[in-house]
Image: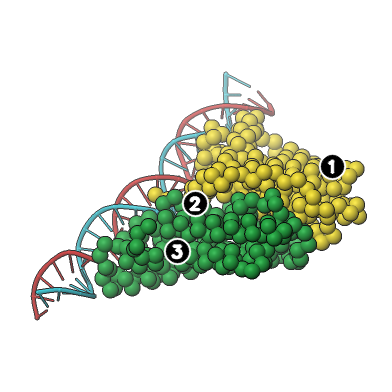
Chain colours: A yellow, B green, C cyan, D red
DNA sequence: ACACAATCGGATAGGGCATTCCACTTGGTT
DNA sequence: AACCAAGTGGAATGCCCTATCCGATTGTGT
């Protein structure tokens, strides 16, 4: 709509003082790391600590947690949209589809915060919502092509993607070390279900030991 | 092993005083309700309040959260095991398989606490672990039959069930009202992937509006 | 070099939670 | 009826979190 900046670099009315600008960058960098490891539930205090700034500095720059999340995940969300657009334009629609699904789920596997961002709807974070919307639209077009190609089942629905993302986030959040393996297995099964031929290869299942060991204490319910 | 009670009624060394016994029952009943609605993260205080007893009474009876969880979910877990055994003994292995998977995932949909219990490994809660183990063994036998029947894919692994349970819990925990619909859809897709023919019917996908509306504020990150 | 507004960060208020403590009450036995 | 160990509930403690306040510091335009 507006011709204004997409990158959101100069939205604020006034430019920050140079030291403040540097602190802002340090906060975002620290938050990126903390969110990646701990998810969006990480405390503001721990992020300030990791950034080496005072609590007040963090809150001055990002009065709500949402603003920090939006700043941190704007770039990953943009890359996600770019991936969806690239997939839409691939020659083989099915290959584009499969590749995109695997890519997004793989990103979730290495970034817990991003996994959560992808499965949430923050009405307030317009930047994120717009990019999610654009990715969704590109993906929807891709679906049409893949169906016409005869490789994607006719009854696949665009909503199956967010459902898969939520499912994948659930697996990743529950099981610890075996998360990536379990996630790959889930995605492989789902792709089988989506494909017209049903002959997709399936990644190996994680062993029961790894799986159950990972389940211990993943959610902090405090077993003792 | 021991000839002692399976129901765990009289484990404690001494019998409780009658009023204490009544309070114990009230606590379990209240916890059952609270856990069903809010999941295992519910605070001890809120359970005591719901039970109409003091905090201290709750902690005296159940010194750790785990003991309370074990007491509350012993019966549901037993029913789960019974369902697995019944499925194993069904005439059509595939029907038993499909029915069991749908049943368990349906239980998750109506009971958030149970959904979490099914996706955790509490080393300390022997009662629960044993029933999980027994259910898992019955299920594994069922898998063998269903494969010999030619209805279940050869590369299905027993670990695919816990993975599905975690995935389903993720969907249910993320999306609010549309949870049951999204869960049914996920389970339908997975059953398709599991079945040799791939011709399983698919429940309808929830509409995008319901799905995205449900995603708002499901996780308490506090949008403002 | 100076002045001052922007910025900083520790301190602090306020709330929720798990867990313990303790003075009081009560069921059950004699 | 009387006794008392078992049981009770609420207050107290300690931890972690969000969010705000305020005196001290510092970048920057002149």
Q: Name the residue under label 3.
A: B74
Contact? badges 3 and 2 (CB < 8 Å) = no
Q: Nearer the viewer, mark 1 or mark 2?
A: 2
Position of A178 with respect to A216 (left or right) is: right
Chain of the residue displaying label 2? B
Frontmost residue, A152 versus B62: A152
x%, y% of residue A40?
Answer: 59, 47
Position of B221 with respect to A3 (left or right) is: left
x%, y% of residue D3?
Answer: 9, 70
Tell which residue pokes out farthest to the front in this image: B148
Q: Mark 2 points at which residue?
A: B121
* Residue for point 27% across, 68% down: B16
- Under circle 2, the secondary element is loop
Q: Distance between the residues labelled 1 and 2?
A: 41 Å
* Residue for point 69% across, 60% down: B149
Chain of the residue displaying label 3? B
Chain of the residue displaying label 1? A
Discs 1 and 3 lie in a common subunit: no
Q: Name the residue under label 1.
A: A86
x%, y% of residue B117?
Answer: 51, 58
Contact? badges 1 and 2 (CB < 8 Å) = no
x%, y% of residue A183?
Answer: 66, 46
């Amino acid at each position: 709509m507006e011709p204004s900046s997409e990158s959101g670099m100069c939205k604020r009315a006034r430019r920050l003082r140079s030291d403040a600008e540097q602190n802002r960058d340090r906060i975002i960098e620290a938050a990126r790391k903390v969110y990646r490891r701990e998810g969006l539930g990480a405390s503001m205090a721990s992020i300030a600590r990791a950034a080496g700034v005072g609590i007040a500095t963090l809150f001055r720059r990002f009065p709500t947690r949402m603003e920090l999340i939006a700043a941190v995940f704007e770039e990953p969300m943009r890359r996600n949209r770019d991936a969806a657009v690239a997939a839409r334009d691939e020659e083989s629609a099915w290959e584009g589809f499969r590749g995109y699904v695997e890519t997004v789920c793989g990103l979730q596997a290495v970034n817990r915060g991003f996994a959560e961002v992808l499965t949430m709807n923050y009405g307030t974070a317009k930047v994120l919502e717009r990019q999610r919307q654009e990715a969704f639209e590109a993906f929807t077009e891709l679906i049409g092509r893949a169906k016409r190609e005869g490789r994607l089942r006719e009854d696949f629905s665009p909503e199956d993607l967010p459902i898969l993302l939520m499912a994948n986030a659930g697996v990743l959040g529950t099981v610890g070390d075996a998360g990536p393996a379990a996630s790959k297995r889930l995605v492989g099964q789902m792709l089988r279900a989506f494909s017209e031929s049903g002959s997709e290869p399936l990644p190996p299942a994680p062993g029961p030991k790894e799986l159950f060991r990972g389940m211990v204490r993943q959610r902090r319910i405090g077993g003792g």
